[in-house]
């Protein structure tokens, strides 16, 4: 899985690495290739579009960190977006409910439901010390119940005794009852599949859900079926409601599209992946690990992360030194504003402080919002270097020029200058006491 995608993306991004500066044309050319590679991998077209757009807006005009190459920066941006597309965090099966916790496995025939049920049962028994009971609700295929019984024996997990003639809902009730009596922590219900979705199947699933009240409904889907797997998940979710997905046959040579589109299209997490016929072939789904595998460039990603940390630490230290000396010019103010923007703007900063809801309203009333950051930065960048270093030289005609350049007015410039003076005075006072860098250092 992912081999050809990895090859394609790898060579596209490798062509970028090593160039001196990255132009919009470079980024666009690379993104065209990325788009093509994702189409080949059978990723849904809407998902590709939003993926490429996000990368474009982040890559063009991105501040390239000192000590890394622009192409490496793009690798990191693509990596982070991939992780985001895959669902950011791994989501494990949730057993946080009163015992017995019921897991309902749904999906088409041959997708790997029975096999996956046994794999999950084995893992929960061995790794989490859970007492598990499995039951097959597939009364249509004569061999299905027997298949689960055999797998249960193989992985040393109890299965519900088979009673001929019982229907799926009856068996589901009996399984939950038996688990209660037997002190089982988890009940896994392996439902019947069909070769395709039809109405009777959906009705049966809804009835079982009503009778057994499952805590998790996991769709088992074959990753080799690509976008069909994604459509299947959407359908099952709208009819029965699913809580997560298990993608099987990730050991095969599929193109990976199902894994890549699934989260973005359905909004449901891939919780596990099947990686073989053997009972050990089950893995948790970690978006970051998958993204690393697809790009095969983990070293570049961590290099950029380190560089970013380093830059922030360097800037913070320089700012602290400046404050100690009591100097704080408009360039410094600009740096501060940019840092604040990076922290998620006003909302982000305020969100980090407890109990400031009211203050936030007041600030909004005073016109202090995120667009203010942008205007203030525009004002600062419309100044000359000399003006930024020495704001006292800003007289009427200079202000007029700056207002025109930044799309603001003299009043707004005066407000900024007043704020800067206030801050500079405060810095001086704090610097004079030989301490106080701490607060601002924390802000960064
Ligand atoms: P069900 O009809 O949905 O219950 O499907 P089964 O559990 O009977 O699986 C159908 C076939 O797929 C069996 O031969 C399994 O061994 C195989 N299978 C299931 N999961 C995987 C997997 O992750 N990788 C591979 N290679 N084969 C799998």
Image (cartoon, helix red, strand yellow):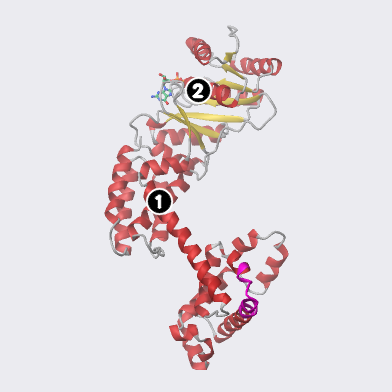
Q: Earlier in the sequence, mark 1 or mark 2?
A: 2
Q: Residue at x 53, y 67 (%)?
A: 316
Residue 37, relative to residue 254: is it above or below? below
**In front here: 261 or 17?**
17
Q: Main secondary structure of the magenta part?
A: helix
Report if the beta carbon of the residue with label 2 is closer than 8 angstroms to ligand 1: yes
Task: Indicate yes or no whether the magenta region holds residue 435.
Answer: yes
> Mark 1 touching mark 2, by CB under 8 A?
no
Q: Which mark is residue 301?
A: 1
Distance, label 1 to label 2, CA atoms, is: 33 Å
> Residue 308 location, x and y as percent?
45, 59
Task: Indicate yes or no whether the magenta region holds residue 118.
Answer: no
Q: Which residue is mark 2?
A: 119
**In front here: 263 or 71?**
71
> Residue 139 location, x and y as percent?
54, 13
Report if the beta carbon of the residue with label 1 is closer than 8 angstroms to ligand 1: no
Residue 89, relative to residue 248: is it above or below? below
Ligand 1 lies in quarter: top left
Q: Residue furthest front?
A: 434
Q: Residue at x 48, y 90 (%)?
A: 398
Quadrant of the rendered structure where residue 320 is?
bottom right
> Residue 419 location, x and y as percent?
61, 80
Residue 46, relative to residue 361: is it above or below? above
Other-residue count near label 1 (Cα within 10 Å), few / some / many at <14 / 14–19 / ≥20: many
Q: Which mark is residue 381?
A: none
Q: Is residue 181 visible?
A: yes
Q: Is residue 144 left or right of residue 211?
A: left
Q: Residue furthest top?
A: 164
In the image, the segment drawn in magenta is 426-438
């Amino acid at each position: 899985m992912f081999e050809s995608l990895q090859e394609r993306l790898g060579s596209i991004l490798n062509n970028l690495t090593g160039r001196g500066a990255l132009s919009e044309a470079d980024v666009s050319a690379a993104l065209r290739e990325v788009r093509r590679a994702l189409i080949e991998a059978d990723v849904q077209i809407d998902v590709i579009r939003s993926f490429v757009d996000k990368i474009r807006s982040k890559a063009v005009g991105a501040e390239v960190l000192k000590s890394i190459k622009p192409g490496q920066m793009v690798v990191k941006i693509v990596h982070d977006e991939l992780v985001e597309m895959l669902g950011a965090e791994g989501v494990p099966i949730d057993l946080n409910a009163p015992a017995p916790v019921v897991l309902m496995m749904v999906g088409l025939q041959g997708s790997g439901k029975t096999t996956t049920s046994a794999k999950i049962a084995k893992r929960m028994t061995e790794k989490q010390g859970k007492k598990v009971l499995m039951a097959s609700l597939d009364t249509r295929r004569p061999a299905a119940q027997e298949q689960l019984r055999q797998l249960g024996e193989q992985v040393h997990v109890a299965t519900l005794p088979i009673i001929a003639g019982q229907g799926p809902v009856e068996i589901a009730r009996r399984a939950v009852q038996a688990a209660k009596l037997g002190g089982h922590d988890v009940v896994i219900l392996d439902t019947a599949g069909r070769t395709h979705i039809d109405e009777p199947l959906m009705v049966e699933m809804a009835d079982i859900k009503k009778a057994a009240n499952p805590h998790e409904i996991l769709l088992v889907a074959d990753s080799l079926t690509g976008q069909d797997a994604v459509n299947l998940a959407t359908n099952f979710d709208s009819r029965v409601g699913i809580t997560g997905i298990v993608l099987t046959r990730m050991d095969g040579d599929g193109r990976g599209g199902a894994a890549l589109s699934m989260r973005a299209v359905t909004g449901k997490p891939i919780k596990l992946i099947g990686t073989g016929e053997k009972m050990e072939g089950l893995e948790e789904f970690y978006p970051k690990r998958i993204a690393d595998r697809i790009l095969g460039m983990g070293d570049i990603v961590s290099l950029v992360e380190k560089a970013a940390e380093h830059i922030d630490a360097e800037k913070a230290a320089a700012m602290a030194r400046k404050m100690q000396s009591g100097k704080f010019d408009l360039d410094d103010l600009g740096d501060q504003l940019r840092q604040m923007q990076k922290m998620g703007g006003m909302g982000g900063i305020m969100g980090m402080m407890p109990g400031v809801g009211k203050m936030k309203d007041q600030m909004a009333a005073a016109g202090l919002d995120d667009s203010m950051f942008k205007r203030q930065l525009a004002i600062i960048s419309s100044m000359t270097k000399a003006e930024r270093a020495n704001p006292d030289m800003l007289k009427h005609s200079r202000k007029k020029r700056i207002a025109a350049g930044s799309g603001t007015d003299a009043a707004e410039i005066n407000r900024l200058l007043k704020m800067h003076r206030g801050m500079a005075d405060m810095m001086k006072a704090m610097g004079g006491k030989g301490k106080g860098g701490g607060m601002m250092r924390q802000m960064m």
